[in-house]
Image (spheres, rainbow, N blue to C red):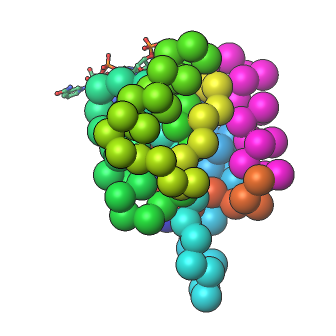
Amino acid sequence: MLVCYETTNSDSLKSCCSSLSSKASSIVKGSKMRYAVVTGANKGIGFGICKQLISNGITVVLTARNEKRGVEAMQKLKECGITNDLVVFHQLDVVDPSSVSSLAEFIETSFGRLDILVWS
Ligand SMILES: NC(=O)c1ccc[n+]([C@@H]2O[C@H](COP(=O)([O-])OP(=O)(O)OC[C@H]3O[C@@H](n4cnc5c(N)ncnc54)[C@H](OP(=O)(O)O)[C@@H]3O)[C@@H](O)[C@H]2O)c1
């Protein structure tokens, strides 16, 4: 499943979605784990969606363009009582192709696939 919440209308959206969706695939039959990436997840809607996905047992890559703000968001999750292994931080600036490539490589290496992409 690819979920792409389009809140901007830019070339970077197309380019990032295209790059990440190439990693996306349907949930593999028999596989219990599902993997999601949430963009702009250090605050606002993205942060809230992370909490929802994690509470539904989905492994989430919480991304933020600014590493410090991303790490602070991870800390906030801990303060909300989310201390499990279902969330990991990775930097992502959606307008920076090298950042997008780095995330795609991380997903490939860590999970081998991506089930959900939330573009917040
Ligand atoms: N909140 C609502 O009720 C609502 C309703 C309808 C539509 N929307 C739209 O939904 C979107 C998100 O709303 P929100 O309330 O969650 O906004 P928000 O609290 O301002 O969060 C926006 C997030 O996007 C990140 N971001 C901005 N540019 C980025 C980039 N180049 N790469 C990666 N991340 C980037 C921001 O990172 P930084 O912290 O580093 O800036 C922040 O984490 C907005 O476009 C808003 O207009 C919101």
Magenta residues, start to end: 93-109
Give the position of the C terminus as an image quadrant.
Answer: top left
Tell me how many marks there are.
0
Identity of the residue drawn at 52% across and 37% down: 62
Q: Is residue 73 visible in this depiction of the protein?
A: yes
Q: Where residue 66 appears, x then y in whole percent?
A: 57, 14
Q: Name the residue: 82% across, 52% down.
A: 109
- Check the image and report above or below for 52 versus 97: below
Residue 101 versus residue 66 in the image, above or below: below
Please state the horizontal and vertical placement of residue 72, each as a whole percent of the image: 48, 21
Q: Dividing the image into four equal quarters, which quarter contains ligand 1?
A: top left
Q: Residue furthest bottom?
A: 30
Q: Quadrant of residue 78?
A: top left
**Drawn side of residue 97 relative to residue 10, left or right:** right
Q: Is residue 108 above or below residue 46?
A: below
The prevailing secondary structure element of the residues shown in magenta is helix
User: Residue visible at 48% across and 40% down?
Assistant: 38
Q: In this view, does 115 lie to the left or right of 77?
A: right
The quarter of the displayed image where residue 54 is located = bottom left
Q: Does the magenta stretch include residue 84?
A: no
Q: How far across and down, in percent of the image, does residue 12 sit?
A: 57, 23
Q: Can residue 15 be seen in this view?
A: no
- Residue 43 position in % (x across, y down): 36, 24
Residue 65, above or below 47 = above
Residue shown at 71% from the left, 36% from the top: 103
